[in-house]
Image (cartoon, rainbow, N blue to C red):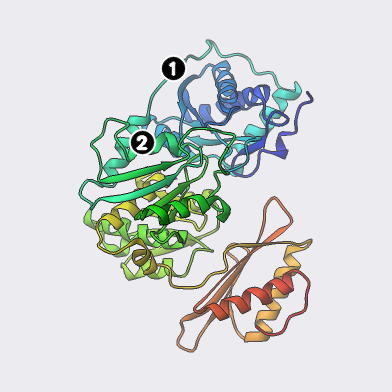
Amino acid sequence: MSTPALADFIKAYDVRGLVPDQLNPSVTRAIGAAFAEVIARRDGASAVVIGHDMRPSSPELSHAFADGVRDRGLDVRFIGLASTDQLYYASGALDLPGAMFTASHNPARYNGIKLCTTGARPVGQDSGLAQVRDLAQAILDGYATLAPGPTRGSIREEDVLPGYAGFLRSLVDLRGIRPLKVIIDAGNGMAGHTVPAVLGDGAGLDPLPLQIEPMYFDLDGTFPNHEANPLDPANLVDLQERIRRVGADIGLAFDGDADRCFVIDERGAPVSPSAITALVARREIARAVAGGAEPQQVRIVHNVITSQVVPEEIRAAGAEPVRTRVGHSFIKGEMARSAAVFGGEHSAHYYFRDFWFADTGMLAAMHVLAALGASTEPLSAIAGHCDRYPASGEINSTVSDPTAAMAAVQDWAEDAYGPVDLDRLDGLTITRTGPDGQWVWWLNLRASNTEPLLRLNVEARDVATMAELRDAVLSIVRGQPTDRA
């Protein structure tokens, strides 16, 4: 087998490739050695913590990575089967850099690696991943030969699941809530491993007032029931049907590595991740204030495509919203800079200061359960308070020149509506405000970093305006003439 070009599948934030053409044991051993040299030694770490998901290739690939780390004279703390946020917990609690083998929601033929430095801080293109890639490529190509460490590192298996479960329980207390019937679809992914420990009694913790009905909890990286990608509505159908049939209070759907959680209400309707961001933000603000913080000193981070309801709810609670670019490295970086207590993305990634600024779908789910269990209202009513504006969702268009397409949309908006607010924090955001100074609609166009795609998001105060804007902008982006929306 020829040596693959690592630049083809080591991207800005993680490693994601086909097995075995791109990711195989020789490749991950080289990446492990490079990670130890570039990241772990820079951190002054004596060991690396490694976990993996349920994909058939994950055990072999993760052990090969461990061999590369040990070749450099560093020890390995091997936690075995884990969710991605469980690996982040291990990195934070053990104060070690880490590697999580998973391809998240991608199909079974893929695998990948999510890397972090000590304290669960992300490793991206600008924080060492490019150097790891280049050194690993040189090792594979025979251009770099690293002298072996003075002694080969050891490997020790460690079970961090009970500690992870107990730590999450310490952040959200679910013991006093009303009884809830909860349907959870793990999609044959890692939530089938973590949910019994955190929300059940699998870790020896006290039972909670939750009647959990599991769906697809068997760990199976071939995904025999549906892909573990709740972003695709087709993968929610089974859960929605079960909720309606049994009269559940709430449904939760996790992706393959269980770092994202999607919420379904008692009617079987998906709850917008922006609504979840607003709901959790209010709870985290209240928690910070109860701990002695002044409300105006509390900051919440959100990205440019979360609903307008998010900053509105944050300000209504007396706190400060902080807007940033889409992507976990930007959210985590801004949270650290602004000392924010919480951050949310419309992709259903939720980040917590008290979880090392890392994302955890499980903790977000626990906040939603706590809010629901403390209320007499159904989830549809609770979420409805935070889901009041019609949105298009993200729509992708293939374009050859994203810059020209964005310029055409800007020209159209200025011609059609006169002065509009322009923002280039992430792509192009256009906002129209009314005579009262309140927003009427906004749209955002962002180019993909990896594909010839332009991503559109539109939100307005009413459905008709949102639909007109959406259709008008898509006509321009896709090269069709349009009239004023």
Question: In the image, what residue type sits under mark 1?
Answer: Arg
Could you say which quadrant of the image residue 317 lies in? Answer: bottom left
Residue 120 appears in view: no
Could you say which quadrant of the image residue 485 lies in? Answer: bottom right
Residue at the spot 48% in from the left edge and 31% down from the top edge: 97
Q: Is residue 214 left or right of residue 408?
A: left
- Towards the viewer: 365 or 400: 365
Task: Determine which of the numbered discs, if any, sits on residue 137 in the image.
Answer: none
Q: Is residue 164 left or right of residue 87?
A: left
Real-space Cα distance between discs 1 and 2?
25 Å
- Among all residues in the image, which is located at the extreme bottom? 435
Question: In the image, what residue type sits under mark 2?
Answer: Pro
Residue 447 appears in view: yes
Q: Nearer the viewer, mark 1 or mark 2?
A: 2
Residue at the spot 53% in from the left edge and 77% down from the top edge: 463
- Towards the viewer: 478 or 220: 220
> Tag 2 or tag 1, which sits nearer the N-term?
1
Q: How far from the left and from the top, in percent, is residue 409?
A: 69, 74
32 above or below 437?
above
Task: Determine which of the numbered discs, if any, sits on residue 156 in the image.
Answer: 1
Residue at the spot 39% in from the left edge and 48% down from the top edge: 183
- Within 10 Å of disc 1 (Cα), the crowding (few <14, some 14-19, many 20+) is few
Residue at the spot 62% in from the left edge and 22% down from the top edge: 29
- Within 10 Å of disc 2 (Cα), the crowding (few <14, some 14-19, many 20+) is some
Q: Is residue 363 left or right of residue 413?
A: left
- Among all residues in the image, which is located at the extreme top? 151
Kindly identify which residue carries mark 2.
Answer: 196
- Among all residues in the image, which is located at the extreme left? 176
36 above or below 245?
above
- Towards the viewer: 131 or 92: 92
Query: The N terminus lies in which quarter of the figure?
Result: top right
